[in-house]
Amino acid sequence: MTRLFCHRSPHSIAPKSLLVYCSRQLSQVVLGSLSLLLLSEALATGLTQCSNPRFNPLSAEQGAHPILTNAVPPPTLPPALQVVAEPVNAAVEQVALYVRPAGGKVNIRFINETGAAINYEVIGETQYRTLAGRSQMLLENLPVPTTFTFRRADFGLLQVSLQEDTPASGTLTVRVRETLDFALDRTTIHVDPSGDVSLN
């Protein structure tokens, strides 16, 4: 409880003047107390903000790290463009011809009707070789099963046609010519033990 002390003698001040003087003193004390209270609250708020700047109390209660509300969010990037590449040549290996092996072996006559050189190989039997444009060669006594691969040196497309010379010869004739159609491009011939010829 606040006590007021009037330093002047009550006998030297009139009752009405004494009442006014005391009222003024009381007002000054009340204003001083309010000022001190507001200053204390302001200091307490400032210290709280400095030690823990603007965090989300809900996250703190849940045991998570404080989330700063004044943080700048990361920029939103446009969705990445999705490019779907469809296979150009969806050729499936299929039986194209039958050749009768002679003594478990076949011959392949390879005719290059293009103007470009062609690299070829019999898997497990020969190394990579090159056949010049508009020329031919004969591969003899290839044991079955056998796989014959070929590709133009300039990586152009090849259309393949197959033909058996004679039923008893065991010789397969392979002709290749240029094409611009990806669906017709072939690069592998496989002959299985029974003589079925697959083109892929």
Image: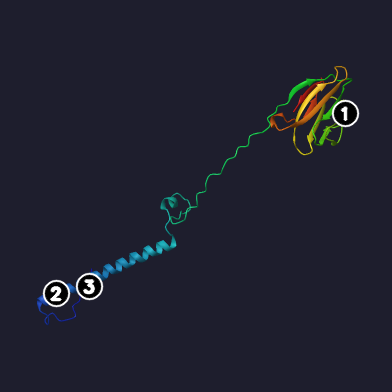
The CA span between labels 2 and 1 is 132 Å
Q: Which is nearer the N-term, disc 2 or disc 3?
A: 2
Task: Tell me where residue 119 appears, x and y as whole percent.
Answer: 82, 36
Q: Amino acid at mark 1?
A: Leu
Q: Amino acid at mark 3?
A: Gln
- In the picture of the structure, the residue carrying the numbered disc 1 is 139
- Disc 2 crowd rating (10 Å Cα; few below 14, some 14-19, many 20+) is few
Task: Tell me where residue 103 appears, x and y as whole percent.
Answer: 89, 20
Which secondary structure lies at badge 2?
helix
The front one of 115 and 93 is 115
Quarter of the figure with the C terminus: top right
Above or below, 7 relative to 3: below
The front one of 174 and 71 is 174
Disc 1 versus disc 3: nearer the observer: 1
- In the picture of the structure, the residue carrying the numbered disc 2 is 20
Measuring 78% from the left and 20% from the top, which residue is drawn there? 97
The CA span between labels 1 and 3 is 121 Å
- In the picture of the structure, the residue carrying the numbered disc 3 is 28
The front one of 160 and 25 is 160
